[in-house]
Image (tube, rainbow, N blue to C red):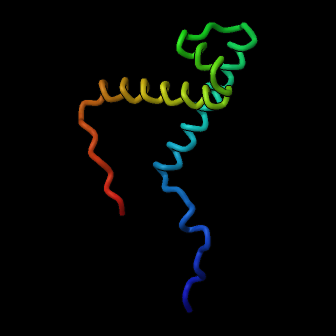
């Protein structure tokens, strides 16, 4: 008897990809919260973010802020790492 093929096997994420997806979602949600606070006048925005919020929709500005946050976090993490990262090979 053969195992039944899994129709969702191609759509599942591996452990590391799932963690990165969840991290990305958390960063975008946090960026949206920050942009809402800026728009309501409860928080100060960086000049580049304030200009972006006036030009673009809030969701796009949130993704830009999340990307910048992720780059800063990865850069900070790279400086602390003693062993250099090796590229991941596709299976």
| Quarter where residue 23 is shown | top right
- Image coords of residue 4 (percent x, y): 60, 82
Is 62 above or below relative to 50? below
Is 14 above or below relative to 63? below
| Quarter where residue 90 is shown | bottom left
Which residue corresponds to the image point at 26% horizontal and 45% vertical from the top-left?
Answer: 86
Which residue corresponds to the image point at 48% horizontal and 49% vertical from the top-left?
Answer: 17
Which residue corresponds to the image point at 61% horizontal and 26% vertical from the top-left?
Answer: 61
Which residue corresponds to the image point at 54% horizontal and 44% vertical from the top-left?
Answer: 21
Task: Answer with left or right where residue 37 lies relative to residue 71.
Answer: right
| Nearer to us in this view, 16 or 67 | 67
- Image coords of residue 59 (percent x, y): 66, 31
Is 86 above or below relative to 47? below
| Quarter where residue 65 is shown | top right
Is 32 above or below relative to 45? below
Numbered-mark total: 0
Which residue is at the far bottom? 1
- Image coords of residue 19 (percent x, y): 52, 44
- Image coords of residue 11 (percent x, y): 57, 62
| Nearer to us in this view, 56 or 36 | 56
């Amino acid at each position: 008897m053969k195992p039944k093929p899994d129709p969702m096997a191609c759509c599942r994420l591996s452990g590391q990809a799932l963690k990165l997806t969840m991290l990305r979602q958390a960063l975008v949600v946090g960026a949206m919260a920050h942009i809402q606070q800026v728009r309501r006048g409860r928080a100060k925005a960086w000049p580049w973010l304030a200009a972006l919020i006036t030009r673009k929709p809030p969701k796009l500005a949130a993704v830009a802020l999340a990307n910048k946050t992720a780059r800063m976090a990865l850069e900070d993490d790279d400086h602390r790492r003693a062993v250099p990262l090796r590229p991941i090979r596709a299976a």
